[in-house]
Image (spheres, rainbow, N blue to C red):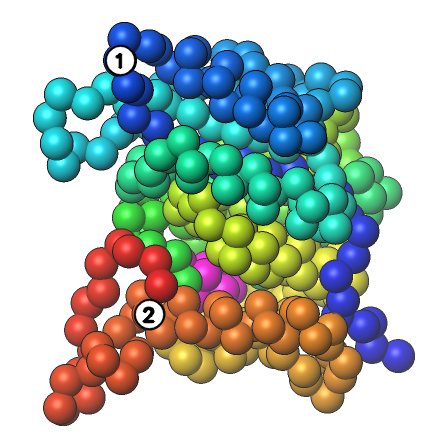
Amino acid sequence: MDPFAAITDRRMGLELEFVVPVIGTGETRDVQELLARILTNQGIPSHVRPYSHAMIPVGFDLCVEHDSSLTGDTRYSGITWAQVEVKTRPMTYPEVARVLPPALDVIRYLGARITTSCGFHVHHDLSEIVERPQIARNLQHLWWRYHRVMYGMVAPSRHNNRYCRPPERDQATRFDNCRTYELLCQRLTRCDRHVGLNLTNVANPSRRTVEWRLHGGTIEWPKVKNWVLATQRWVEHACQRSCQYRPVPSPNARSGLDALLLSTGLRPNSRIYAKVDTELRTVGRYLLRRWKHFNGQSEESQNANGCVSRIGDPDP
């Protein structure tokens, strides 16, 4: 029987980057401490620290960090911007849905902004890869096959971004012969983490996560919700089924998008996922709207001859 495409209890960790205007003579640390204090007062225990790859301390839901790679809005001169990154502890999706909406309300209330320097990264637990290293091969094949479509669903500023680069052809099969976890870890030592799909953390015994890095920064819960569920579904698909290598990736076209949604369980398909969770069907429709927006396929963005016009960075 084909596996049921549903929301699972796989844990995930989120990283949200944004900038906040500094009013008065304060510094980024002051903004971090203020944000953490307000979040904690709202029942979301939050910890302040410099930028770190360490685990979130026990007892906290969020870490509020400084990220020096972020740049502020340049519309008006003379404004100092705090460069902030908020990270969650590993959570199931129901926990994310409980913690993030009120946290994002506070972040927006403090005047946070998103610039093209900001990203939104999602880590998914992949602890089973120790026993099943072929999952890395499946993920890399899936990523290679549909990466053009996936970039078609995010802002153009992410397409040639050095922090979330697309895969090269020779990387598509880099894990094909990794039949043991030890061999996979050796191969990963030569990999860069600044790619749209980052697998380097699966070699870290304290993490063992796969990270999706290609989405631009956001502090809007609907965008967070749909992206974390989409990436979770892609990870589950790679864990459940064998993803075959295709030399030529699917084009960033409606046909490629439909193939991605059908083959990974974001739309029903009698040959693969005959039954798809209602909420995941909603995710599929959301991705379709984003793809149309960024690729000029809405009615408003087509000219009289049906030609596609270029859409800028703003999200729908």
Point 43% across, 25% down: residue: 84
The answer to whether residue 73 is left or right of residue 200 is left
Which quarter of the image is occupied by the N terminus?
Answer: bottom right
Q: Position of residue 104 (x, y in %)?
A: 52, 41
* Residue in the foreground of this view, choosing between 260 and 155: 155
Position of residue 271 relative to residue 261, above or below, is below
Indicate the amino acid at tag 2.
Answer: His
Image quarter of the C terminus: bottom left
Q: Quadrant of residue 308?
A: bottom left
- Tell me the SS state at disc 1: loop
| Residue that protrudes farthest toward the front in the picture | 41
Mark 2 lies on a secondary structure that is helix
| Amino acid type of the residue tagged 1 in the rendering | Gly
> Could you tell me residue 60's position as x and y percent?
71, 23
Q: Residue 304, relative to residue 242: is it above or below?
A: below
Q: Does residue 126 appear anywhere in the picture?
A: no
Q: Identify the residue at image location x=76%, y=25%.
A: 205
Magenta run includes residue 149: yes
Residue drawn 70% across the image and 63% down it? 237
Spot occupied by residue 164 in the image (x, y as percentages of width and height): 41, 42
Circle 2 sits on which residue? 293
Q: Is residue 17 left or right of residue 90?
A: left
Q: Position of residue 307 (x, y in %)?
A: 17, 83
Label 1 Cα neighbours within 10 Å, binned few <14 / some 14-19 / many ≥20:
few
Whether residue 176 appears in magenta in the rendering, the answer is: no
Specify the principal SS of the magenta part.
helix
Instruction: Identify the magenta region.
Output: 144-151
Q: Residue furthest bottom?
A: 305
| Dot placed on the residue nearer the N-terminal end, 1 or 2 | 1
Give neighbour class at mark 2: few <14, some 14-19, many 20+ (Cα, 10 Å). Answer: many
Q: Say the numbered circle drawn on residue 24.
A: 1
